[in-house]
Structures are given as structure tokens and as C-alpha cells.
Amino acid sequence: MAHQSELLLRNGDVRVFDDDRTVAESVLFRGDRIAAVGSTDDVESAADDPRVVDLDGRTVLPGFNDAHTHILSVGIQLIETDLSEADDREQALAMLSENARDTADGNWVLGFGYDESTWPEGDRSYLSRAELDGVTETNPVAVTRVDGHTVSLNSEALEKVDFEGVEHDVITDEQGDPTGRVVEDAAGRVKIASRPDVEKARRALDAAITRSHELGITSVQTMAGLTAVRDHGNLVQETLQKAWKDDDLTLRVTYYVHASQAASLSDLELAPGFGDEYLRVGGLKTFSDGSLGSRTAKIHGEYADDPSTDGQMVHDGDELEAWFREAARADQQIATHAIGGQAIDIVLDRYEAVLDEYEIEEPRLRVEHVELATDEALDRFADHDIVASMQPNFLQWSKPDGLYEARLGTDALPTNNRFRDIDGADVPLAFGSDKMPPGPLYGIHHATNSEYDPQRLDVDRAIAAYTRGAAYAEHAEEFKGTLEPGKLADAVVLGRDPFEHRAEIEEIDVELTIVGGEVVYEGS
């Protein structure tokens, strides 16, 4: 038998995150598995000829698992115009202009991640056609808001995209002229028109993997978006498969397929979690409503800043149930986007309608986001072991003068994203980022430092949701999510202990990221 490489991390705080919350001194990785955890003497005696890293008291956690992201979008944002750090409108437009100067005439100029709700007061409107016309007159420009449900276009892009049949999602002014902003189905048409080719998608994937490693992420669960960008196959799946075939996938990926592939997925009769330890099929991804940022999340009541609407269903209950039955036919897991209280209730209704059609004991149906669930909804989650797949980084908007207050009113500040209430109701809780931004420590910081009791978790529960809870959400807890012997050798070494530095968690450095016993990132 060939000798397997070994990596020994010794003399630190190895937080195993098993049921007993064991804290050990050292851990040994042999090959791609955890071989031993315990005292330094015991672990060293189990080793043959390891590479040794002295932790000098540093903290080791199971590798972070982002339970809800869009891995290709993370990379596209990195290689195009990343507007997440734009402090105001002027800076965002300047960044887009710089991209345009480097883009050949006729090609798309793309921007991602802008968040007008964080810009100076009085300057919080969406980017407009007139402003983007000033960026370039020779290229179509498409700028996607941080939530992905609103896209702003210049005149060239409005002319280039076919909006036939989705005109209702093209926003117009009082004179009936397009403002440049499009939402939901119309935003999807823009994504189709501006989609990357496979070569560019592969570059984006490589960039996203590198960024994930820098953040301590060893696994992701990547969700199909609202729009299928082509009428055959799936660009994300093709890109992931090519990387896997080339043995270049150093990030563990579970992907959830687009609703248009529901019948195809069931016809294949794949077992839940089909694949290997690097690339797996999670199940079906569907959408119910839109987003709060775009005022398209289907809420109970009306929007505080636009009482004319309570949001919209992107797909109604009947459409959802038809897809759910296709998934149930092959015992496939379902992950459904639902933000507003009305949308969550509708999804639960339709889940309950198909649960008896599953033959497996634990289908672990999922609801993604769950931002405005009622107490009654949480009882239904618990009754059916439905996973709440949530994003603690969304609390960046739940503060005075933030997005939640603007959209829903001051009373909503403690009543959105109720992580403590959900965890306390025995609802399975998994944390992800939805790439806004993708850093787990940023999200954990917000969940543990919220000023509102219904949202605030202790450090243990927040980290658990980003490790073992995320593994449970994808039916993978038997082989990852904790640092127990026999499980995959995936870990992150932090510069400081988040349990001891709760108030500064978002500032803690990732010093090592380990996937399959190999160091894939080493901080300076």
C-alpha cells in the first residue's frame, strides 16, 4: 500500500464540534481523512512521518460550508466590476467607466453587487439608464444589484435585450419611458443576453475557488439562479463538470439544479447526494418570491416605503407544487427561495402536499432565506424537519436607517432573520452567504453581535450552523461538518479564537485552509 501523506496540527485549540463539543490539542490528517484527534502526545504517537504545523495556541475549526451561494457569480463579480465596496453612486459609476475603457466596443460591460441602501442619505435610488449612458455609448451596460433581483441598464442594453412577454418587469417612469431598471423575469432576460462563455465561466470558477479558500471555505452548496441562461444543459453544471474531470476542483461543491430541469433530474433516478466527495447533486432549486431590496418579496402587509405593493410571487403555488412532485418522484431534495411571510407560508403548504410521496425517511426539504417567517411557520418547519437555510450576513441591513427599516418599518428590525428563535424551535439551521459577501466570519459576526435577542446566537451555535448544520442540510453529516476521526480532512485555522473575541469575529484572520488534508491557502 502506498504511503499516505500526513499533516499534523499540534498545540492549539482544536474545536471538534462533535455532540460533546470536544476541544483537543492536536489533530492528525492522513490522506484525505482525519486520523486522530486528542492530546498532543496521543496524536503524535499515531503519526508516522507527518508535515507538522505548530498552532501555538491558535484555533482549528471544521472547514466552513457555505450552505447557499452562487459559486460562478462569486467569480464573475471578481473578474468583472465588483461594486460591493462602492461607497456612493459616483464611485460606482467611475468603476464602471474604468471597465468600459478596457472593453471592446459592442461587448458587455458588467457590474455586480452595488447596494444603494448603504450610500449617503438622499442618494439611495437605483442606478438609472441616464447615468449608465454616461458610462459608455459604445457598449451595453448591465449592473446587477447586490440581491440579484434588480438590474440597471443603459440605452444600448435596453435595445439589445428582448423583453417580449416580460414587459411587466421593465420599470417605467410616469411618462411610460424605461428607467433602465428591470426586475425578476426581465432581469433574467439580461442574464441570458450577457451570459459568459464556458472559457470565461471557467476563469470565474477558478477565481471563486481561490476566494473561498482565502475565507476558510472548504465546501459550498451552489444554487441555480432564477434564470436558465441557455436552453440546453446548464452553464454552471458544465463548468463544474469540466473542472472535476480535469481534477482541478479543490473546493467541495454540491449543486442544486434549475427548476426547468426538474423532470430531467427525476428521470435520471439519481440517489439523493449522487456524486463523490468533490462534486455532488443536491437536488432541485426553485423560487417563490423576489427580494426585499427590489420590493418583490411577498410579505404579509405592505411595504412601508411603497404601500401600493406587498411584493410578488415569481412562481405561484401550483407551479411550485408541480416541480415538487417531480422531485418527490425520485426522492430528490428541494431547496426553495422564500423571503416574505406569505411566500414562506405558500411554500410550506406545497411541501406538505407532497411529503407523503417521498419514500425516504428524511427528505430534508429546505427553505432558503426565511427572512420573515411567522411563529406558526416555524412550528411547521419543526414538525416536518424542514431546514431553514439562512444568511446571517443579511443582518448588515437590519439596523437603524438600513434596508429592513426602509422597506418594512422600524418594528421589523428585531423580527427579521430570527436565528435564535428558529434554533430554539428545534428547526434545523444552516448558514450560507448568498455571496453578499461570501465570508463566513462576517456572517458569524453579525449573528453573534446583533443587538436584538430574536436574532442573536451564541458563538457555538453560529459556527455550528456554518459547519455541522450546513452538512446536515445537504445530507452530508456522515462525512463532513466536524473534526471527528474518519471524516474528511477539511479544516480552517484562525488567527484568534472567536469564542474569546466575539466582538471582533469579522476581523479574525484565516491563516490556513485545508481541504482533503492538503493546505490550499496559507495566509501571510
Image: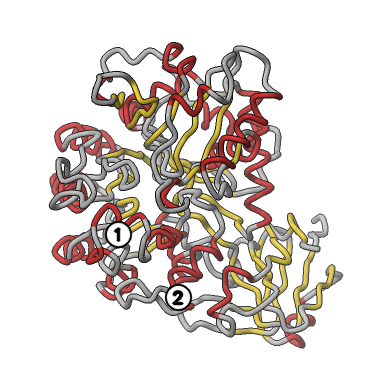
x 45%, y 71%: residue: 462
Q: Is residue 346 left or right of residue 277?
A: left
Residue at the extreme front of the image, as rendered: 122
| Mark 1–mark 2 CB contact (< 8 Å) | no
Q: Position of residue 110 (x, y in %)?
A: 56, 29
Q: Which residue is mark 2?
A: 449
Dot 1: within a 10 Å radius of its alpha carbon, few (fewer than 14), some, or many (20 or more) residues?
some
Q: Is residue 489 left or right of residue 295?
A: right
Q: Is residue 35 left or right of residue 307?
A: right
Question: Callout 1: helix, strand or loop?
Answer: helix
The image quadrant that residue 247 belongs to is: top right
Q: Position of residue 382 (x, y in %)?
A: 22, 65
Q: Name which residue type carries label 2.
A: Asn
x 19%, y 53%: residue: 341
Q: As displayed, is residue 247 above or below residue 384?
A: above
Q: Is residue 209 visible?
A: yes
Q: Which residue is mark 1?
A: 405
